[in-house]
Image: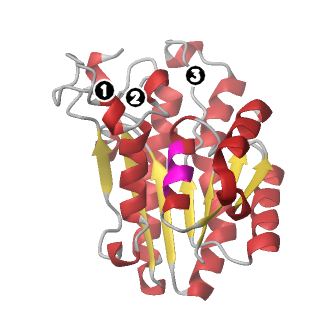
Amino acid sequence: MRHALITAGSKGLGKKVTEQLLEDGFSVTVHYHSDTAAVEEMKSELGEKIERVQFVQGDVTKKEDLLKLVKETLEKWGRIDVLVMNAGPYIFERKKLMDYSEDEWHKMIDGNLNSAFILLKEIVPVMREQSFGRIVSYAFQGADHTPGWLYRSAFAAAKTGLVSLTKTVSIEEAEYGITANVVCPGKIVDEYKEASIDEAKKVRDEETPVGRPGTGEDIARTVSFLCEEKADLITGAVIEVTGGVDVLHKFR
């Protein structure tokens, strides 16, 4: 049985990815930060699938927590075939770089970029031994082209760096059967992060060119495809799942 490790996998977009990979037959380690109520709710919904799930608490901005996450995963399952870096700290307040505190800057870089470095250093060697691995990181629309993003300087800097890092890993690790790709969610508001596509199709969204809201299932289906055995020719790709919305310029 293949095993997936998903950061921030107990709610929001990450929850839908967890559910999808369980449906695909994976066992899953679900990392969560602090919301134990979300974890308990998820446990109650899993039914018999709970036997294929492990929950591990931690802060992705802390190296020791990331090392513990990998250690506990390997102790229980003995392998990691898929790494989905769903966690991505974000500052909602709109402000210019000059108004960021040093702590806020480090939180964005540690949580979105340095965390990937630490996880990759620990997990890629495991994937090499298995001659198989699927790595999925997240960025934002346009991140492939290093755009400026007004009022999101720290987050944008971290995520564009993560895109470059993911692409580099995709080249360096291709010979080991490891792929690495980036998924860029578009405008997916809170009420639709755990929603299905069928639910969204009942709603007309005038701001989205395809006419409906984006959902967590849209992201989960994309991740699922990238994790398939036969998806090995797709690596180093940056896949935007936006419904045609110009996220950078329309929602400032």
Q: Which residue is mark 2?
A: 188
Quarter of the picture holding the C terminus = top left
Q: Nearer the viewer, mark 1 or mark 2?
A: 1
Residue range in magenta is 16-20
Callout 1–callout 2 Cβ contact below 8 Å: yes
Residue type (three-letter) at the residue carrying disc 1 = Pro
> Which of these two is toward me, 54 or 135?
54
> Which of these two is toward me, 17 or 94?
17
Q: Position of residue 210 (x, y in %)?
A: 17, 31
> Which of these two is toward me, 85 or 161?
85
Residue type (three-letter) at the residue carrying disc 2 = Ile
88 on left or right of 241: right
22 on left or right of 64: left
Q: How much space separates mark 2 and mark 3, taking CA atoms?
A: 16 Å
Callout 2–callout 3 Cβ contact below 8 Å: no
Q: Nearer the viewer, mark 1 or mark 3?
A: 1
- Crowding at dot 3, Cα within 10 Å, few <14 / some 14-19 / many 20+, comes out as some
Q: Position of residue 164 (x, y in %)?
A: 42, 55
User: Chief secondary structure of the magenta span?
Assistant: helix
55 on left or right of 80: right
- Crowding at dot 2, Cα within 10 Å, few <14 / some 14-19 / many 20+, comes out as many
Q: Which residue is mark 3?
A: 91
User: At 53% across and 87% down in the image, what residue appears?
Assistant: 131
